[in-house]
Image (cartoon, grey):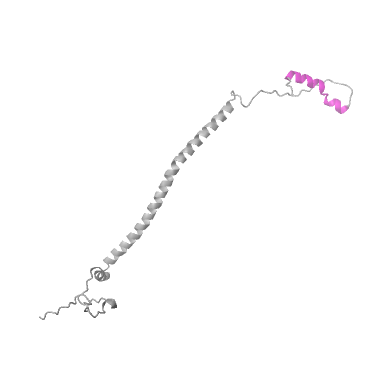
Amino acid sequence: MPVVSPSRARELVRTCVPSYRENLLGSPRRTPTVRTIPVRSRRSRSSGSPQDPQAWEVVCRIGVNILLTTAAISGLHRLLPVQLAQYHRLQVLEQQIEVLKTRVSRLQEGVDRGMDPLQQEALIKERLNKVPANQIQVRLVPPATLVASDEDEAGPSWIGQSREPLPIP
């Protein structure tokens, strides 16, 4: 469609468009009525023109956003292995803590048992093999060791027993 200048467009509109009254009334009389139609002028704006400041602004904003996004992604790329190593190290430390907690509880039970006056005698018997003076120590020996062969004599069956006769006082 060819571009028409605004003055030429007014001239064409005056000659081609009959008046509104003439069509309604059907009168043969022609009164020259001037009817103007506003003509919009076209500006030659191309979206890719380098003179348009809004286009430059949009391009700059997109460029800055891409730059910031790239910086954020590269930072995450560097931090991810460090975070994974710390997470693995944390799991190892938590396992060691559990092992140490069981050890501490076992040692605490031993300390508590050693501090109890009622348990001290039992601990002395258990650890030092001492028997109080008013008790006799009895040891159970498997029966196979008590059977003597024909050639050998039976050995001592408990501690303190010897083959030599006791000296008479």
Q: How many labels does the image show?
A: 0
The answer to whether 130 appears left or right of 31 in the picture is left
Q: Provide residue 12's location: percent of width, then percent of height.
A: 79, 20
Figure quadrant of residue 6: top right
**Rendered-image quadrant of the C terminus:** bottom left
Residue drawn at point x = 78 percent, y = 19 percent: 11
Q: Provide residue 113's location: percent of width, then percent of height.
A: 29, 66
- The relative height of residue 1 versus residue 127 in the rendered view (above or below) is above
- The relative height of residue 63 versus residue 161 in the rendered view (above or below) is above
Taking the magenta stretch, the answer to whether it contains residue 84 is no
Q: Which of 135 and 17 is in front in this view?
A: 135
Q: Which of 169 and 39 is in front in this view?
A: 169
Residue drawn at point x = 30 percent, y = 62 percent: 107
The answer to whether 107 appears left or right of 50 in the picture is left
Task: Tell me the magenta residue range.
Answer: 5-25
Of all residues, the one furthest to the front in this rendering is 151
Q: Provide residue 103's location: percent of width, then percent of height.
A: 33, 60
The answer to whether 59 appears left or right of 18 in the picture is left
Q: Provide residue 79's location: percent of width, then percent of height.
A: 44, 42
The answer to whether 40 appears left or right of 67 in the picture is right
Figure quadrant of residue 59: top right
**Rendered-image quadrant of the N terminus:** top right
For the stretch drawn in magenta, the main secondary structure is helix
- The relative height of residue 31 versus residue 160 in the rendered view (above or below) is above
Q: Nearer the viewer, residue 95 or 17?
A: 95
Residue drawn at point x = 83 percent, y = 26 percent: 20
